[in-house]
Image: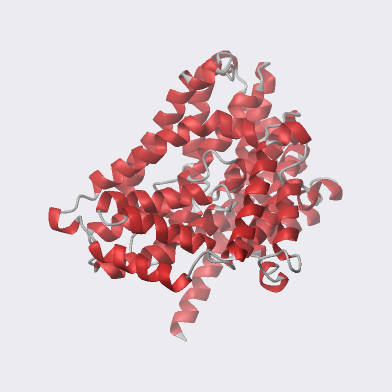
Amino acid sequence: MKSNSVENARTFLFIGIAILGFLAVYFLLPNDFSYAAKVMTSIITLGIILWSLESIPIGLTALIILLLMLLFDVADTTVIFSGFASPATYLIVGGMMLATAVNETALIKRMSYTILKKWGGRSAGLLGSIIMIQQIQAFFIPSTAVRSALILPVSTMIIETTHAEPGGNLRKMIMLGVAFGGVISGTSVMTAAIGNILTVELLNRLAGINITYFQWFYYTFPIWLLLIPAIWFMLLKVFPLPEEQQYFPAIKDEMTKKLKELGPVNAREIRCLIILLTIVILWLTEPLHGLHPSIPALAGVVLMTFPVIGVASWEPVVRINYNTVLLVSITLSMGYTFVDSGASTTISQYLSVDWFLQLIQNPFPSVVIVIILAQVFHKMISNVATAVVVLVPIVISVAQNAGVDPLVMAFTTGLTCLFGFILIVESMPNLIAHSTGMVSQKDFLKPGLYATVISVSATIFVAATWWNWIGLI
């Protein structure tokens, strides 16, 4: 009873802080901001505080933001509700349903067990397997949270099999492999992370620029290829293991046992794989047929659950996480309303001083600037979706004020917001790994700092080379 009272007191304290943040922003903003712009910026501040402090569920916070936008009449109702009609929302819904349908088969488990059986017998191979499994899943499962959640039971089983000591380097290495592997798994596959989808949608809506699934992959795959081995190598060095703890013969035996329990590959798994490959091919060939990625995703759900040819029943597939649906839909609405209220335009005017506009005339310095800006901003605004829908419209507006193409700046901003390594609240994979109780926030600090430097350096290097060669900058 006492515990509940303390928890309730903390919840009301955090809500009070959020309300104070709302009032402070509203009354401290200069008169250059219109009424709608002031209120909208204040609502976003309240939402950021509630999401950061996690005082109430993320879906409930999103719903409160929606109600406040409606009650304060900061924009036309159609704009406020427009996030629910966005194709991006249906892509996320379809992706979550696909993930559930795939998980109804043994396909993902079989893939994970097979990879771990082959390479999991040594510490380097074990960590590499945990990271690579999530990279492969990224093509089929459009959610960093779901991918990390799927690998977590396997990782926990590995910890038990290897008798990894509490607080030991092996446990930390495995858990941070889950976290950081999940974060970077969203880099090159446009549908693999909410932030990517939101960035594409905002560029389309606010700047009339369409980035296809193939284009996103084409722009980012060098960064991805640099991050995978760099993060793997960094974790091995930060969490060194003595020679006697680097070999795990029991893992091969355990994986062999698990594969035997699954039995031979069955018709359901084959049908599931064929449907998934069809969806990926349709995503990759978007420039040829023009179908928004949400259409293949939803078609995949139909095929996965259709009688006879499907692989899963409808009832479990439709039980998706509506916290995520509300978060995506309402943060999109928040982004559109942020622009419609004039708040993003006013803020961009403050940033549009002569020296800054001259600086971003050159594409490469502009990329470096937005990478640093996005990293700092993401540390203050832990929620990736919120960071994207607030920062990307401002960057687009500043680029337009400077008379430059907003594509590179906005694209780089959205991509950088994905890379949250230092704080556990910066990404869902971090939170999922931390929720096991096997790693603390302190364990994230040193490797997280190194991972941040690696991701920033990789993006800048690719911008100076690959993006320059292909004419992106």
Residue 9, horizontal then vertical, whole percent: 51, 73
Quadrant of the snapshot with the C terminus: top right
How is the rendered protein coloured? secondary structure
Q: Which residue is depicted at the point 41% across and 46% down?
A: 421
Foreground residue among 11 and 419: 419
Q: Which residue is depicted at the point 76% across and 29% down?
A: 208
In the image, residue 86 sits, relative to residue 255, either above or below, namely above
Residue 437 appears in the figure: no
Q: How many marks?
A: 0
Residue 45, horizontal then vertical, whole percent: 61, 49
* Residue at the farthest bottom position: 1
Q: Is residue 126 left or right of residue 426?
A: left
Foreground residue among 372 and 3: 372
Q: Which residue is depicted at the point 52% across and 16% down?
A: 469
Quarter-wise, where is residue 319 in the image?
A: bottom right
Residue 462, horizontal then vertical, whole percent: 46, 25
Quarter-wise, where is residue 32 in the image?
A: top right
Q: Is residue 136 left or right of residue 293?
A: left
In the image, residue 465 sits, relative to residue 272, either above or below, namely above
Q: Is residue 77 left or right of residue 67?
A: right
Residue 196 appears in the figure: yes
In the image, residue 9 sits, relative to residue 69, either above or below, namely below
Residue 402, horizontal then vertical, whole percent: 65, 17
Foreground residue among 451 and 41: 451
Q: Is residue 295 left or right of residue 139?
A: right
